[in-house]
Amino acid sequence: MPAEISGLRMTRQRWEVYRLLMEQRDHPTANDVFIRIKDRLPNISLATVYNCLEALTAHGIVRQVNFDREPSRFCPNHEEHGHFHDRRSGTIHDVSFKPGINLADVLDLPPGTVITNVEITLRGELPASPIAH
Amino acid sequence: MPAEISGLRMTRQRWEVYRLLMEQRDHPTANDVFIRIKDRLPNISLATVYNCLEALTAHGIVRQVNFDREPSRFCPNHEEHGHFHDRRSGTIHDVSFKPGINLADVLDLPPGTVITNVEITLRGELPASPIAH
DNA sequence: CCGATATCAAGAATAATTCTAAATCCATTT
DNA sequence: AAATGGATTTAGAATTATTCTTGATATCGG
């Protein structure tokens, strides 16, 4: 366990939360993390999971993703990306821009606008997998 | 008051909620609507405001907009557009794509993906108004 | 006008998240 | 190593936006 990541001192709990997000990249909720992490930290509390996720988020180590008013989900992907929620499977997928595309270039914003944060969420259906039939 | 809009039967309450959203396009929350609408409907309940907003949303007459986990906001703008939250003033502005830009063209999605819903939210700072100095 | 159905109102219930207070941990100094 | 002080963890209470429940009220077709 590193002593710190991005200036955030690592504790056992923060490290295990971070590790779980890195290993299970399906955008779990705080409660999902709480349930899954009990293998390794049987005594952790839900409040601590929230604390850890908040600390990791505040330091830019993980990203909080919201779909409408559903429970927040968390992912450790640093690339600028959006999220696609597949109605059919209920799974969430990272979506990036096509190479060379810059968000500021496609949006109609006054010149000089500073964008500090972007959230793009999509819902729909992915095509049936070409491998699957 | 029309008998219905987009297949939704208009009631006094729904009509006033709708009218308020059309007239005050600053993306109010349900509670904002509740407070503002008391002039016209002193006996309306917050639950009814929620009911009306839900009915209007379900019929595509207004749109529910979420910023992180803040209270939902509502707007009657039907154009495909995103929302920019200006940190300096706290105001929310509609943002559209530049003419000719199609979201599906700039995102890296598998061919055949069906997008049913898009939400784009931005945070940042608008430039100081060029008129203002 | 009458009955069926939809809507409204008031307050209780829900659920995600945050807060509180006490216990514990950890790094540093004595 | 013990003491100190600050950060972290824990458990449970509190908060808050929203939804649900129930009974009352309004509305529509006949």
Image (spheres, coloured by chain):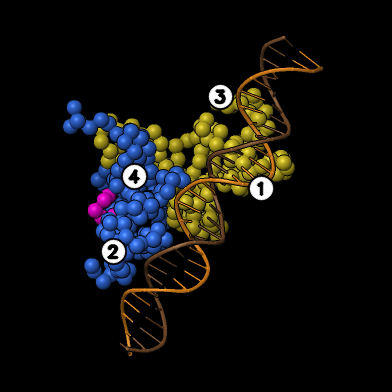
Chain colours: A yellow, B blue, C brown, D orange
> Label 2 sits on what residue type?
Trp
Q: Please tell me whether mark 3 sits on a helix, a strand or a loop.
A: loop
Q: Which residue is mark 1?
A: A35
Residue shown at the point (49%, 54%) measured from the top left: A86
Q: Which of the 4 image quadrants contains residue B9? A: bottom left
Q: Which residue is mark 2?
A: B15
Residue shown at the point (25%, 30%) measured from the top left: B128
Is C27 placed above or below B93 here?
above
Quick check: can you spot residue A47? yes
Q: Please tell me whether mark 2 sits on a helix, a strand or a loop.
A: helix
Is B53 placed above or below A42 here?
below
Q: Please tell me which residue lies in front, C18 or B64.
A: C18
Q: Please tell me whether mark 1 sits on a helix, a strand or a loop.
A: helix
Q: Main secondary structure of the magenta part?
A: helix
Chain ID at mark 3: A
Q: Please tell me which residue lies in front, C4 or B43.
A: B43
Q: Are marks 2 and 4 in contact (CB under 8 Å)?
A: no
Residue stretch in magenta? B21-25
Q: CA distance from mark 3 to mark 2?
A: 53 Å
Chain ID at mark 1: A
> Label 3 sits on what residue type?
Gly
- Decide if residue B47 is on the left or right side of residue A33: left
Q: CA distance from mark 3 to mark 4?
A: 32 Å
Quadrant in the picture for the C terminus of chain A: bottom right
Residue B127 pos. (x, y %) = 27, 31
Residue shown at the point (34%, 46%) measured from the top left: B82
Q: Earlier in the sequence, mark 2 or mark 4?
A: 2
Q: Which residue is mark 4?
A: B83
Query: How many residues crowd mark 1 within 10 Å: few (<14), some (14–19), many (20+)?
Result: few
Q: Are marks 2 and 1 in contact (CB under 8 Å)?
A: no
Residue A96 pos. (x, y %) = 44, 41
